[in-house]
Amino acid sequence: MRKINLFETSRKKMRILLRSIPTTTVTLFVVSVICMNLLANKTLLQLDWIALDGGILISWLSFMCMDIITRHFGPKASNSISLLAVAINLLTCLIFFVASIIPSNANDYSAFNSIFGGTWFILFGSTVAFLVSAVIHNTLNWFIGLAFKKNPHGKLAFAMRTYISSFVGQFSDNFIFSVIVFVFFAPIFWDGFHWTVLQSAMCALTGAVAELLMQVVFSPISYRITKKWRAENVGKEYFDYIEKEKA
């Protein structure tokens, strides 16, 4: 009985959360996660000491959305939306896979099938890496914010929690993904193509720095969004429910 009540409570909380977060933020977040998965199929640069995949072009947007959601709604809410994004991404990949295996004599769709059919270990690696990095990012972001007791809503507090958590989260995401996909699975399934651990680490570091620069550029927009949400009392229904749950 208690398990059923916990399930119903969690489901109700999720429904309220989805009603509370502005649609644009959730949409951009989900789309960025899907695009990361597709872009990760292409290696943009590979040298002896560094390698970069296409996911670096969009991953900053995912972390920016998590920054905004974590700042306003808290890490648990951000983790819940991250799980939702992963679930939608997996469903999208399933639909893409089904479309890729349906035969067609209309044209040569081998390139389409290769890209949208996906690779199972890339999907596995990106899913694991994103979930782990999301929890790390959201938790770190929240705890850094707790250190700014005098002015928790100020620009300095927002910048520090955004920059530090995004850098650590991005590094974790890039490194975990690179090791799983390019160190362990690629040599087996891609005719010996692989990255070294050093390349994976440098990819993670370089990607984290590049994405941190993107955060520096766009964080003023993120800050204004959270400031606007606070002024407009966005999420009142969710916060009221949380307070009621604690009582």
Image (cartoon, rainbow, N blue to C red):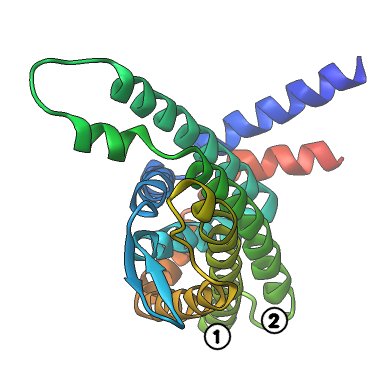
Q: Position of residue 3 (x, y in %)?
A: 87, 21
Q: Which residue sits at x=73%, y=70%? A: 143
Q: Secondary structure at mark 1?
A: helix
| Residue 10, image quadrant | top right
Amino acid type at image mark 1: Leu
* Left or right position of 56 against 184: left
The relative height of residue 139 versus residue 49 in the rendered view (above or below) is above
Q: Residues within 10 Å of mark 1 (few under 14, many from 20)?
A: few
Q: Label 1, on which residue?
A: 156
Q: Label 2, on which residue?
A: 148
Mark 1 vs 2: CB contact within 8 A: yes
Q: Position of residue 224 (x, y in %)?
A: 40, 69
Amino acid type at image mark 2: Phe
The relative height of residue 173 versus residue 121 in the rendered view (above or below) is below
Q: Position of residue 14 (x, y in %)?
A: 62, 33
Q: Residues within 10 Å of mark 2 (few under 14, many from 20)?
A: some
| Residue 167, image quadrant | bottom right
* Left or right position of 149 against 107: right
* 183 or 89, nearer to the observer: 183
Q: Which residue sits at x=67%, y=26%? A: 12
**How many tags in the picture?**
2
Residue 101's tag is none
Q: Position of residue 20 (x, y in %)?
A: 52, 40
**In which quadrant is the N terminus drawn?**
top right
| Residue 148, image quadrant | bottom right
* 26 or 193, nearer to the observer: 193
* 69 or 52, nearer to the observer: 52
**In which quadrant is the C terminus drawn?**
top right
The relative height of residue 186 versus residue 115 in the rendered view (above or below) is below
Q: Which residue sits at x=55%, y=51%? A: 185
* 153 or 100, nearer to the observer: 100
Whether residue 20 is visible to the viewer of this picture, yes or no, is no
